[in-house]
Image (spheres, grey):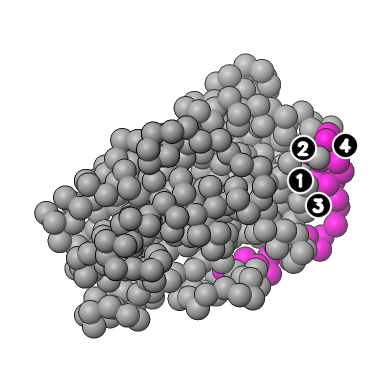
Amino acid sequence: MKILFLAGGSPATVFALAPLAQTARNAGHEVFMASSEEMLPYVAGAGLPAVPVTDVTPPEWMFTDRDGSKLALPHEPVEEMRFAGRGFARLGLHSLPRLTALVEAWRPDLVVAGMLSYAAGLICTRYGIPFVRHAWDPAAPTEMDFGANQVLRPELDELGLDALPEPDLWIDICPPSLRPPDSVPAQMMRWIPGNQQKRLEPWMYTKTPGKRRVAITAGSQAGGKVARGQYGGLLREMYENLKSVDAEIVVAAPESIAADLRDELPGVRIGWIPLDVLAPTCDVIVSHGGGVTSMTATNAGVPQLLVPTLMHTVAPSERWAEYGAALTIPRGEDTPERSAAAVRELLADPSYRLRSQELAREIHALPLPVDVLVLLEKLVAEGGRA
């Protein structure tokens, strides 16, 4: 069986799909992962055949409309999520010509696409290929789908569709206790971190005896060319907010911004540290609320302080907090006093770790990628519709 995996425009979208893609390849299926040119090192780093389908960069597809006009990020919460959906839809449009050529040349039996990889539904409808939609994180894509429908109206009309095509199967990775009540029916699958690896040093998987460890991260997207200044400043600010806490502070950051931070924060361990390796050694993880980061922390049963920087991460962050596995602080309100107090509370109150460990057990009890692969094989054998 030939399976085409379609990622998005950030490393997290590659990491989220990698476990199932690796499982399929290890089972003997032919697997390609298609993404933007900028993401190919992450795809190849996961040991997967990498196919570029566009060289457009995030600033272009997110902030340039179909007619070439420049766009500004709205500040109203719902509209910001719809804006993101429109951006991902434009990424799909940029990908369509080369994706079409790939499908015609390689003839996949199945397409497994990340939840905002909107070109997949168009391609699968056009060529009659079974279509699987795979969650990247616990965020609900409803409002982003609304925005994508707006941008893709001409393509949907051409295919005779009123809205984005429904997948033959939806794969969700959210711990059941954190799924919203109105979630669509889905095949649940165990979250397995797909982080990019590197040579490990002992301090990454052990910690100083008698010393608590707090990790700070803004995710892999912080290494993007445009994001470096923004996220470098965020990481620096996070560290300054927490340096009064009695704990070892470790900063997980892409090497593209780590060098500058090391110069500014001598003596602090800073750099690309595979979060799945680091997380089990941590007592608290502080982050921007990104889905892959939060899921990796939860997989390890580690409490979190979440400071969401994007609107679509706010609701999932709040669900973690409501469950008792995290604390959240709105971006802009994360003062040194409030941030340090939150981390101290997470360190002092064992209930946060107990609740995080409950969620970890939920994740570990879900079907493995190898179990879900059996359903994909059946889907192809039966011609679609699980």
Q: What residue sits right under mark 3 in the picture?
A: 346
Q: Amino acid at mark 3?
A: Leu
> Marks 2 and 1: in contact by CB < 8 Å?
yes
Could you tell me residue 371's position as x and y percent? 38, 75
Q: Characterize the local packing of mark 1: few (<14), some (14-19) or many (20 or more) Cα atoms within 10 angstroms.
A: few
Alpha carbons under labels 4 and 3: distance apart? 14 Å
Question: Would you say residue 240 is visible in this rendering?
Answer: yes
Q: Nearer the viewer, residue 266 or 311?
A: 311
Q: CA distance from mark 2 to mark 3?
A: 20 Å
Q: Residue at x 67, y 58 (%)?
A: 315
Does dot 1 land on a helix, a strand or a loop?
Answer: loop
Cα distance, mark 1 to mark 2? 6 Å
- Specify whether residue 344 is painted magenta: yes
Rendered image: mark on residue 79: none
Q: Secondary structure at mark 3?
A: helix
Q: Are marks 4 and 3 in contact (CB under 8 Å)?
A: no
Residue drawn where x is 55% and y is 21% of the image: 259
Give amino acid for label 2.
Answer: Gly
Where does label 1 land, which residue? Answer: 330
Quadrant for residue 325, please give it: bottom right
Magenta stretch contains residue 335: yes
Q: Main secondary structure of the magenta part?
A: helix
Q: Secondary structure at mark 2?
A: loop
**Kind of residue sitting beneath label 1:** Pro
Q: Position of residue 192 (x, y in %)?
A: 48, 60
Q: Earlier in the sequence, mark 3 or mark 1?
A: 1
Q: CA distance from mark 2 to mark 4?
A: 13 Å
Residue located beneath label 4 in the image: 337
